[in-house]
Amino acid sequence: MAQLVVRNLESDLIHRLKQRAAEQGVSAEEEHRRILRRALFGPEEEFPDLKSLLIMPDVGEDEDFARLRQPPPDRDWS
């Protein structure tokens, strides 16, 4: 993997990057990578494994996927 060094950044920018990373639960370096990916490739490229969800056809109604609520079977716990 290649490395990228960015110099002469304002301290406020660094602070906001670290704050944003902390909110996401990732390192500042990982958040920096995510920002670059989104800026250059778009949000769908950030998580390529989820791309299949974006091309899934929009079919069916919510009711088609509703869980049927049934009481648990009676069990003898003795």
Image: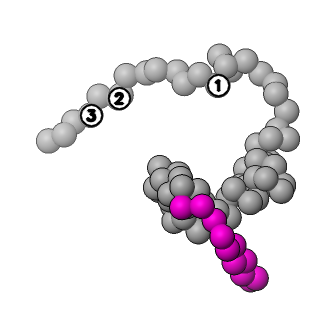
Range drawn in magenta: 1-11
* Residue toward you, 15 or 43: 15
Label 2 with label 3: CB-CB less than 8 Å? yes
Q: Which residue carries the number 1 mark?
A: 65
Earlier-in-chain disc, 2 versus 1 = 1
Could you tell me which residue is drawn at 69 percent across and 56 percent down? Answer: 35
Residue 25 lies in the magenta-colored region: no
Helix, strand or loop: magenta stretch: loop
The image quarter containing residue 62 is top right
User: CA separation, marks 2 and 1?
Assistant: 23 Å
Q: Which residue carries the number 2 mark?
A: 73
Label 1 with label 3: CB-CB less than 8 Å? no
Q: How many other residues sit within 10 Å of disc 2, few (<14), some (14-19) or many (≥20)?
A: few
> Which part of the image, by quadrant, shows the N terminus?
bottom right
Secondary structure under tag 3 reads loop
Provide residue 10's location: percent of width, then percent of height: 60, 61
The three-letter amino acid code for the residue at tag 1 is Phe
Q: Which mark is residue 15?
A: none
Q: How many other residues sit within 10 Å of disc 3, few (<14), some (14-19) or many (≥20)?
A: few
Residue 2 lies in the magenta-colored region: yes
Could you tell me which residue is drawn at 43 percent across and 21 percent down? Answer: 70
Q: How many other residues sit within 10 Å of disc 1, few (<14), some (14-19) or many (≥20)?
A: few
* Residue toward you, 71 or 33: 33
